[in-house]
Amino acid sequence: MFPKVMPRRFLAVAALCLSALSLSAADAVWLTDLDEGIKVAKAEKKAILVDFTGSDWCGWCIRLKKEVFDQKEFAAAAKDFVLVELDYPQKKKQPAEEKAKNKAWADKFGIEGFPTILLLDANGEPFAQTGYEAGGPVKYLAHLAELLKANTAEGRQAFAQAKKDEGLVRAYGAELETIVTPFFEQKDFAGGEAAIAKFVKAKSLVGSVKLELTVNARISLAQACKPGDHAAVLKVLDEIIAETPPDMKELSELKNFRAQVAAAAAAKEKK
């Protein structure tokens, strides 16, 4: 229990102020209550880094903590972020109130895997998300510095739209899979292509949602109907790339994927 004479939030602020004076690992203060973290962030005018972790069972969570968060260099993150750990353990006991609050936050932000590192502004609005990154604390700090640039009205809006798109991809993806699976089994490539095009038109799909669903469905169809035929996959990719607006950020990733398929095709021909 904290002393009655000093409110808990002021103790947290004081601890975080002290953390800025040293780069020792012990001074990298992690709160365990996001409501408290938001109060501190407002007082300190900082962003918030929330580590959604399974501390006693998630291997990547344990590695991230050991390789990055527990290293003395990472304490420099306290200059820009209030650090909050929300834990979802499977073995160790957790107070019922903390467990309930953590579940509510995970539901609110749609957390689906661990570790998830969510970056919030001082009001608790998300603007970026990441996870485990190899390379140690210095590299991770540089990664966070890049993500911090998205802490703007535009960045928060873009993040919200991306999360909305993810939800649509999950919902429509399950529906489209049900429609296209029979064509996989029948190895009816033309029929499957027609069914996918009809679905995209019926749902008025556009932008990133359309692109992700189309790539997944059409490539899966080509692989199922024409197994081992790299040329068929490349043809599908070329058609999708030609239809993708040049300003879409996913285009470069799509072209990289095409290059990987082309390389695999070339390697197969040499054998």
Image: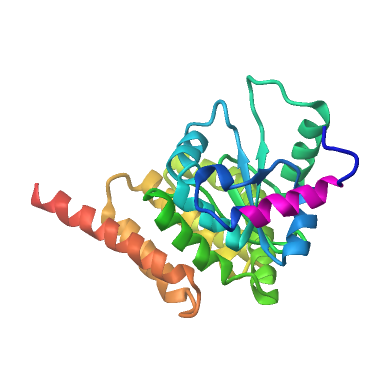
Quadrant the N terminus occupies? top right
154 inside magenta stretch: no
Instruction: Give the image quarter of residue 261.
Output: bottom left
Measuring from the top left, give residue 182's x and y in whole percent: 53, 41
Residue 186 lies in quadrant: top left
Q: Residue furthest right?
A: 4
What colour scheme has been applied to the protein in the rendered image? rainbow
At horizontal 68% and vertical 68% (from top left) the residue drawn is 156
Per the rendered image, the range of residues in magenta is 7-18
Q: Quadrant of residue 87?
A: top right
Which of 114/200 is in front? 114
Q: Residue at x 85, y 38 (%)?
A: 3
Most distant residue in the left direction:
270
Q: Is residue 191 visible?
A: no
Q: Is residue 9 magenta?
A: yes
Q: Residue 269: where, in percent of width, then height?
A: 13, 52
| Residue that appears at 72% across and 53% down | 14
In percent of width and height, residue 46 lies at 68, 64
* Left or right: 102 in relation to 186: right
